[in-house]
Amino acid sequence: ATDPTSAFGGIIAFNRDLDADVLETVLEQQFVEVVIAPAVSRAAIEVARRKKNVRLLSVGPLAGAPRGLEYKRVGGGLLVQSADELCLDAAALRVVSRRAPTDAEMRDLLFAWNVAWFVKSNAIVYARDGRTIGVGAGQMSRVVSARIAGLKAEEAGLPVAGAAMASDAFFPFRDGIDAAAAAGIAAVIQPGGSVRDDEVIAAADEHGLAMVFTGIRHFRH
């Protein structure tokens, strides 16, 4: 999202059935190699056939059973751990700032948190009005990821003022909050659990940000 250079020759996945008009619009705007959807209309298949090197995949219903456990090979063995489940609702969150998020901010916080599940750590996601406006991924420090998310939004011409920010793990220092506030972020969702949580919460209060803790993290390598 907000990075058309990286999207060149990429994959687009839909969470709803795909028709010819939507596919035509996508293929006219950018070069895509693979398009995935739960179901694809016959007309959409004909559109794909007219385009060179476009692969169209119909994957059926997306709902599935909880994964339960994850397995990862490590040197000399196998790591077995509880799966990081995507679902989280507002009732599970803890407001830790003086200001509570508005209903609109809460919707964007939950949306950004879900997007962060797919992003490599250190992951920061900026979201506004139900869409991703900036992503900072794979950086060694969380504050740099926060700055990159703001940069991506700026490059795409998307305003950050009033947006929500999700962090896949806790902020070890207040610098990430300061960077987000400088960009225009209004609300933050993060796991919490840092020895400097008080410092981070104080930074949010200084900037007038709403902050909620999830108590769980998405840390993904």
Image (cartoon, helix red, strand yellow):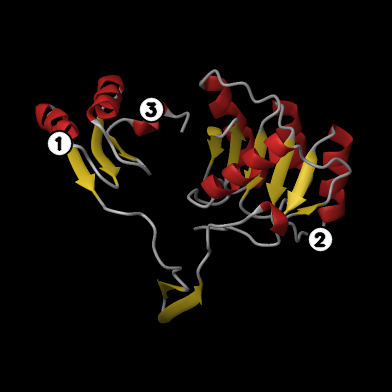
| N-term mark: 2 or 1 | 1
90 to the left or right of 75: right
* Label of residue 5 in the image: 3
Which of discs 3 and 1 lies nearer the camera? The answer is 1
Does residue 179 appear in the picture of this structure? no
Depth check, front residue: 88 or 165: 88
- Residue for point 82% across, 42% down: 100
Rendering coords of residue 201 (x, y %): 84, 47
Which residue, given by chain and number where applicable, does mark 1 sit on? 42
Depth check, front residue: 11 or 72: 11
Does residue 164 appear in the picture of this structure? yes
Which residue, given by chain and number where applicable, does mark 2 sit on? 195
- Residue for point 54% across, 37% down: 135
Rendering coords of residue 191 (x, y %): 69, 56
Residue type at mark 2: give it: Val
Rendering coords of residue 186 (x, y %): 74, 33
- Residue for point 70% across, 59% down: 92
Residue type at mark 3: give it: Thr
Residue type at mark 1: give it: Arg
How packed mark 1 is, by other alpha carbons closer than 10 Å (few <14, some 14-19, many 20 or more), is few
